[in-house]
Every structure is written in structure tokens, then in C-alpha cells.
Image: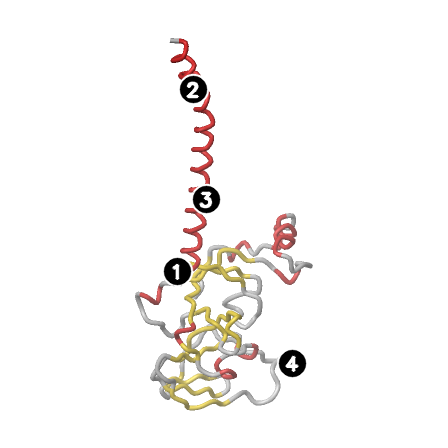
Amino acid sequence: MASKGKEEDAAVATTPAVARKSVLREYAEALIIAVLLALVIRTFVVQAFKIPSGSMLPTLQIGDHILVNKFVYQFRPIQRGDIIVFKFPQDESRDFIKRVVGLPGETVEVRGKEVLIDGKPLREPYAVFSDGAFGRSGERERIGPISIPPNRLFMMGDNRDHSMDSRFWGFLDAAKVKGKAFLVYFSVRSDEIPTDSSLGSVAYVLVRPSLIRWGRLGSMVE
């Protein structure tokens, strides 16, 4: 009987250690699943990007943080007017963001401020130009008419006089498209932040909430 009691005591004594091990395992499994889900979402569904330049002004501001839908083109073709993130053709380690102006099979022509698609002027309420004393000097470019090859796109920035786009580096291979920008989830006047460190930038903004463009948070990218 005494031997049986000792065995029971021993069994009871080991139970807390087993429970602790089980809890740790559950936490580890939950963490692994969360990381895997985050990687899947970032790779195939949605990815965040930051706007570092003014080539898409006024549609996108410097310091805007946007979300890009990476699977939308699995269900529909790329359309004129879409604002997309893509691998820069001259350096694929860099991501660019521009607006789709010309589609495969179309003829595109640029006459100064005017863009023509298949000979017809394109209505572009989003396009802006640097006119005035500090604006662009000299005659604006004249391009085309040129035919857009299959699976290629003609891209332009909304800030036409300050955009490195298809007028300079040619057509974009549609296979290099990463996704369609659809939401500004955060925006800050980054030109007033005195550090390039991500952590330092966050800390700087947290104590200076006036730097946040509150009105842009949650706005759709169009």
C-alpha cells in the first residue's frame, strides 16, 4: 500500500511541469501560425508601402502609407486609371508606383500636357503640371504615336513634370506588377521628421501628433 501511495504522489508531482510544457507549446504553435499567416498575407494578399516622392501628387502625398491589393488581378484585368506598384524596369530591387495610362494593343501619344489614346484625347482630372515662375521651362515632350505591345503598359505619374515614368524608361511588363493601391492607412508629414530611422520616426510622431495628416487616414486611393 505504501508503495502505491508513493507512485500516486510521484504522478501528482509531475503534473504541473507537464501543464507548463503544454502551455508553452500552445503559445509557440500560436506564434508560428501567426507568423505564417502574416507571411502568406504579405506575399499573396495585401502589402504595405510608403510613398517617398512626389511623383503622384496630389493623389498620393509624400509620407502616405498605403495598402496594395496583390490578388485583385487574379480576378480582373488591369484597367486604365489603376494606380499600381511594380518593380522598376531599370532596377527591380526598387518598387515604383504610377498610374496606368495605356493598355496593350492601344496607340499612345503625348503632346505636351495632352495624352491621346488611339487618337482621342484622354480625360485626366488627376494630372497636374508645374506652370508658373518656378515651373518647368522649355517645351514639353512630344511622344508617339506608338503602339503598346502585348502584355505591356504605358505608365505615368500624376505629377507630370516631376515623374520618372514610361516617357523615360519605356513600357512596363505587366508581369512586373505587384498589385493595385487601394487605401491610405496612415499619413505623416515626413519632411518634418529629422531622422531616417523607422523606430525613431515612430517615436518622434507619437509625441508630435500634429504631424499626422488625420484627414487622409482611411482614404481610398483613386
Q: Secondary structure at mark 1?
A: helix
Circles 1 and 3 in contact, beta carbons < 8 Å = no
Circles 1 and 4 in contact, beta carbons < 8 Å = no
Q: Residue at x 57, y 77 (%)?
A: 162
Residue 136 figure quarter: bottom right
Coordinates of residue 4 in the picture (x, y in percent): 38, 13
Which is more foreground, mark 1 or mark 3? 3
Q: Nearer the viewer, residue 158 or 178?
A: 178
**Which amino acid, by three-letter code, is at mark 2?**
Val
Q: CA distance from mark 1 to mark 4?
A: 46 Å
Of the 4 image quadrants, the one containing the C terminus is bottom left
- Mark 2 — residue? 12
Coordinates of residue 47 in the picture (x, y in percent): 45, 59
**Which amino acid, by three-letter code, is at mark 3?**
Leu
Q: Which mark is residue 56?
A: none
The local crowd at label 3, few if under 14, some if 14 to 19, many if 20 or more residues have their Cα within 10 Å, is few
Q: Which mark is residue 44?
A: 1
Q: Does residue 209 lie above or below 163 as drawn? A: above
- Mark 4 — residue? 133
Coordinates of residue 186 in the picture (x, y in percent): 52, 56
Q: Secondary structure at mark 4?
A: loop
- Mark 3 — residue? 31
Coordinates of residue 69 in the picture (x, y in percent): 40, 62
Residue 131 figure quarter: bottom right
Q: CA distance from mark 4 to mark 2?
A: 86 Å
The local crowd at label 4, few if under 14, some if 14 to 19, many if 20 or more residues have their Cα within 10 Å, is few
Q: CA distance from mark 3 to mark 2?
A: 30 Å
Q: Does residue 103 lie above or below 22 as drawn? A: below
Which is more foreground, mark 3 or mark 2? 2
Circles 4 and 2 in contact, beta carbons < 8 Å = no
**Which amino acid, by three-letter code, is at mark 4?**
Ala
